[in-house]
Image (cartoon, rainbow, N blue to C red):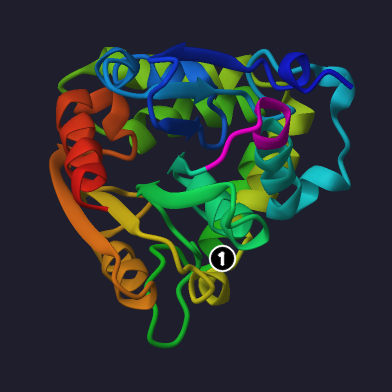
Amino acid sequence: MDIRRRNNVTVTGRVDGPVLLLAHGFGCDQNMWRLVVPALAESYRVVLFDYVGSGRADPSAWDEQRYSSLEGYAQDVLEVCVELDLREVTFVGHSVSAMVGVLAAAKAPQRLSRLVMVAPSPCYIDDDGYRGGFSAEDIDELLESLESNYLGWSAAMAPIIMGNTDRPELGQELTTSFCATDPDMARVFARTTFLSDSRQDLMTVTVPTLVLECRQDVIAPREVGAYVRDTIPGSRLVTLAATGHCPQLSAPQATVEAITDFLRVA
């Protein structure tokens, strides 16, 4: 299969620049990075793609069994890297993609040499000594609502996830993105996302890592950012002066500055 077509791969920026591979989260696609790409493209070769089941990826490549685990999405990442012969890549993963990047880096350290984790969460469910932000009952109710009425769930939840109620156009954009996703594929990705527990996987990370969090995020509370930092040796945590779960949209300049500052010293 043509991987570039399958994952709707696009490449921009400096042909000879260090490579940044930008990976979107649940219910999104590569368009969610559009406000940060121009600035990053000045110095870097920027590679974007859509996971199978999202955006303009080839829907005929969908495999429910494969994409019922984060390893299936990590395989997408690695196959894009092999197709483009990408090495020494800085993987920038938003939300659940941060954990996808952890898995991909463990499998192919020669491909991914740095991680930038944007609003990550290794586990959404509270546990003894760990606050993920949701109880098991919360997640059950969220998934039940999503599975029974995906479009209605999207319209209600996307603005909450985005935050920034003073800028309703941001919430509307995320709603539109969610609603453009095939409901059956979205249900699988949602269960994979919200029921995953990648806390043990964080301990496998050996590459330089930046953790980016917002000062207020209903999906990934501040305790999660601190947990990720404390679990990945030598990682750096930056709290952006931003709210919501998508700082690449709500605070693109601050997001770019944090990434580029990290890359200067990593």
Check disc 1 and give the amino acid type: Glu
Q: Which residue is mark 1?
A: 137
Identified at 42% across, 20% down, the residue is 16
When the figure is inspected, residue 110 is found, relative to residue 15, above or below; the finding is: below
Q: Is residue 50 above or below residue 146?
A: above
Image: 240 above or below 198:
above
Q: Secondary structure at mark 1?
A: helix
Q: Quadrant of residue 249?
A: top left
Magenta stretch encompasses residue 86: yes
Give the tally of numbered discs.
1
Query: Start and end of the magenta stretch?
Result: 81-87
User: Which residue does the image show at 37% across and 47% down from the upper left?
Assistant: 116
Q: Is residue 127 above or below residue 196?
A: below
Q: Is any atom of residue 170 visible in this view?
A: yes
- Which image quarter holds the N terminus? top right
Residue furthest front in the image:
16
Q: Is residue 155 left or right of residue 263?
A: right
Residue 143, x across and y down, in percent: 64, 48
User: Could you say which is closer to the camera, residue 191 or residue 149?
Assistant: 191
Circle 1 Cα neighbour tier, 10 Å, few/some/many (<14 / 14–19 / ≥20) = few
- Residue in the image at 18% along x and 53% along y: 238
Q: Compare residues 97 and 193 and report the one nearer the observer.
A: 97
Task: Kindly tell me whether residue 144 is visible in this rendering.
Answer: no
Residue under the point 15% across and 32% down? 254
Q: Residue furthest bottom?
A: 128
Does 172 lie within the magenta span?
A: no
Image spot of residue 244 (x, y percent)? 27, 38
Horizontal and vertical percent position of residue 146? 63, 38
Decide if residue 25 is on the left or right side of residue 260: right
Give the x, y percent position of residue 68: 78, 49
